[in-house]
Image: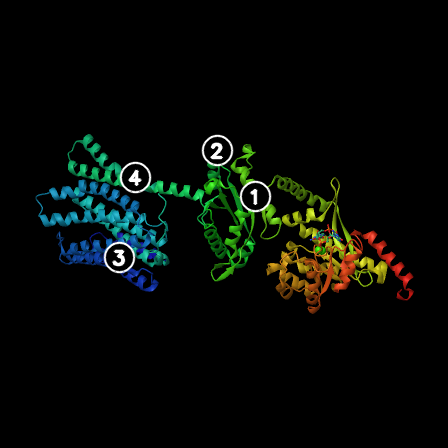
Amino acid sequence: MLWLVPAVAAVGGYLLLPADSVARSVAYDVIGLVSALMIAVAVRRRRPSQPALWWWMAAGQAVWVLGDVLYSVYDKVFHVAPFPSPADVFYLASYPLTLAGLAMVVRTRRRAFDSAGLLDAGIVVTGLGLLSWTFLIRPVLDDAATPLTTRLVAVAYPVADVLILGMLAWLLTTSAVRTASFRFLVTAVVLLLISDVAYGVATTLFTYSPSVLDAGWLLSYVLWAAAAWHPSMRRLGEPGEAPAISRGRQLALGVTMLITPGLLVAQGVTGDGQVDWLAAAIGGVILCLLSLARYTGLVRSLQRQSSRLAEMALHDDVTGLSNRRALEQRLTHLLTEPGRHPHLVVIDLDGFDQVDNRYGRAIGDALLVAVADRLGTYEPAGMLTRIGGNEFALLLDPTDQPAGRQADVETIVAPLRQLLAEPFSVAGHALLVQASIGVAGFAVAEPTAMNPVELLRRADVAVHAARQHGTGGVMAYHPQLDEKADEQARIGAALRAGLDTEQFTVFYQPIVDLADDRLVAVEALVRWQHPIWGVVGPDSFIPVAEANGLIVELGGWVLQQACAQAVRWDADLADAAPGRISVNVSARQLAEPGFAQTVAAVLTRTGLAAHRLTLEVTETAVFGGGQALGTLWAVHDLGVRVALDDFGTGHSSLGLLRDCPVDVLKIDKSFVGELTDGDRDSVIVAGLIPIIEGLGLDAVAEGVEHAAQAAQLRRYGYRLAQGYLFGRPMAADDMHRHLTHQRVARRRLDPAAA
Ligand code: C2E
Ligand code: CA
Ligand code: CA
């Protein structure tokens, strides 16, 4: 932009040259020519994406300057100043070129056609057109002493100026992007208009034009060149959002609208009869019509916006389904009608977050849309809504159904399950979606409870309970669920305090060799001694700790305790110490990226050999693959053994035995029931042996309570077992005594073994 300094200096220098001198005239033409040339050079150099508009403007500029040169020749060489002269042909030819260039800028800068911009420009043109007509055009046309051609040429200038002004007004409404180039261009056009008008006023009213006015045109040339030269010129033709209606724009519109009445008032006050009544009337009518069109457009766009807002407020923008608010509205309406007993089914997509994390938001959204589409085909039709990130709700109104059939949960849920059974194909991925489903309604006897918030709450409670049943669970609301939810909330709140004030202890349960009932390992089982509630079982607080994430801290603590205890027993009991120690690990812990490091750190800190630690995980925790599986491999690589806990109750996919680093299967106690030959459980328990042996795994039969079960298990070929028969979970001290007794007993039996 440095050249702008000499350019402005040149304009200043020009003004210092003696008026009417040849030098001054030549300087004027040179500045004009150089400016026009610079636009052309800039277009070649900067290669804007829309070169055409620049070429049109450059042409307008060049033609105008040629007019200047011609004028100078007449003035300085022939010392005449004819009007009109061939110079005017160039000047007037320049306007259409410039207008075309500006029109192209308008077209390329706007995103979409915006009638408001055109109407506003129209209002400006009308208002200022009237002003121009009154003071510049009509006086010239009325001057009968002047030849008609002269008059026509003379009025062509103000007419062209009004058009340029309108184009400028339109241009300002196109895009909010205001680059330096754009500002230079606007200033150049404004200067051109000011100079034209000043010249017009000076010659028409005073028949004299001071040459200082030339400076305006000269500056306009320079700024036009500056607009082309500035690097931002490449973005002049870039489309942008329409600018907000600024205060300046409102003011400009207000002022132009006041021109017509203003003129009439001025006329009335001065009474000089200059105002053309007909023109003023026509101008007023046009302004009125334009404003009316503008107003109508505004109202329409407001209406569109408000209905879109209303639409948005009741719809979910990913799936296009109604949202929770719409559901509440519908329920409010429905529940006031007598005899209605709607059911609300909440469908919670299990593991949806994993899809989002693994494949990204776009695919997650596409999956939601696909799920919504499929759920939309549910028969009998209900109102399907999306009420949360991965939660859909289906409102079923049984009175819509044939013969007002009161649907039971299974008839409601079975078609849903069927709809979700097939995988969804999204962007080339086949995604299987599991859902936890909660169903809620009102009993006929409780009309007072019937409000939308309560129904939604019940459905939430039900789906929450369904989720706790593992993937694909279904639960119908019943009041006991509330008690359970309350209790869980209480437990959740107490867990934190429990951890901080050391209310937890670790118990140990023997795992024995069935051949000689010798203790070979212990399983660490956490216990919670609450100061008021007494002993709280892990089955009541582990799921809560998993839900609120405290299991990570609690589980880490158990791991540390158990490993440290194992090392202490080694020191105290030598070979009577348990050979291995098992610690339960929940899905949430495996999902932590740093879990393997935590395990490694505990082993280092306590000095326990990795192969003596077994981590017990459930099939469900690793079934989903991903992070959990990776963590398990990392832990296994440390030398730690992995046991699949409660085997048989989860997914029990044989594929899991292939993908997952398993060393031990813990056969769930539900299979170790009566174990009478030939019943289903014993077939399964016996049938697992070849698989276990074939894969070289250890198997532990859990929940062995009677000698008969132990005998049967021995017969099937089981070598390890755990259960009340061999010992209940006990405190570390008790376990210490238990182990010491065993050692004493063994020595007595077989002194050589000691
Ligand atoms: P689990 O891992 O299957 O633990 C075995 C459960 O069966 C223990 O219940 C144990 O007391 C019980 N049990 C042992 N022998 C018998 C028997 O002969 N008959 C019967 N009916 N039950 C027997 P517990 O200690 O109440 O633990 C329940 C569950 O809580 C555990 O099941 C485990 O999943 C979880 N858990 C316990 N401690 C922890 C822990 O530190 N971390 C994690 N993540 N989970 C734990
Ligand atoms: Ca276990
Ligand atoms: Ca178990």
Residue ID at (30%, 61%): 51
Q: Are marks 3 and 1 in contact (CB under 8 Å)?
A: no
Q: Which callout, 1 or 4, points to the residue nearer the camera? A: 1
Q: Are marks 1 and 2 in contact (CB under 8 Å)?
A: no
Structural crowding at the residue carrying mark 3, measured as other residues with C-alpha within 10 Å and reported as few (<14), some (14–19) or many (≥20): many
Structural crowding at the residue carrying mark 1, measured as other residues with C-alpha within 10 Å and reported as few (<14), some (14–19) or many (≥20): many
Lower sequence index among marks 3 and 1:
3
- Above or below 732: residue 719: below
Q: Is mark 2 within 8 Å of ligand 1?
A: no
Q: Which callout, 3 or 4, points to the residue nearer the camera? A: 4
Say which amino acid is labelled 3: Met
Q: Which residue is mark 3?
A: 57
Q: Quadrant of the N terminus?
A: bottom left
Q: Position of residue 68 (x, y in %)?
A: 20, 56
Say which amino acid is labelled 2: Pro
Residues at marks 2 and 3, CA–CA distance in whole angstroms? 75 Å
Residues at marks 3 and 1, CA–CA distance in whole angstroms? 67 Å
| Quadrant position of ligand 3 | bottom right
Q: Which residue is mark 1?
A: 460
Residues at marks 3 and 4, CA–CA distance in whole angstroms? 34 Å
Mark 4 residue element: helix
Q: Which callout, 2 or 4, points to the residue nearer the camera? A: 2
Q: Which callout, 1 or 2, points to the residue nearer the camera? A: 2
Q: Is residue 724 left or right of residue 662?
A: right
Q: Is residue 572 left or right of residue 625?
A: right
Q: Is residue 146 left or right of residue 737?
A: left
Residue furthest toward the front? 678
Q: Which mark is residue 338?
A: 2
Q: Which residue is mark 4?
A: 295
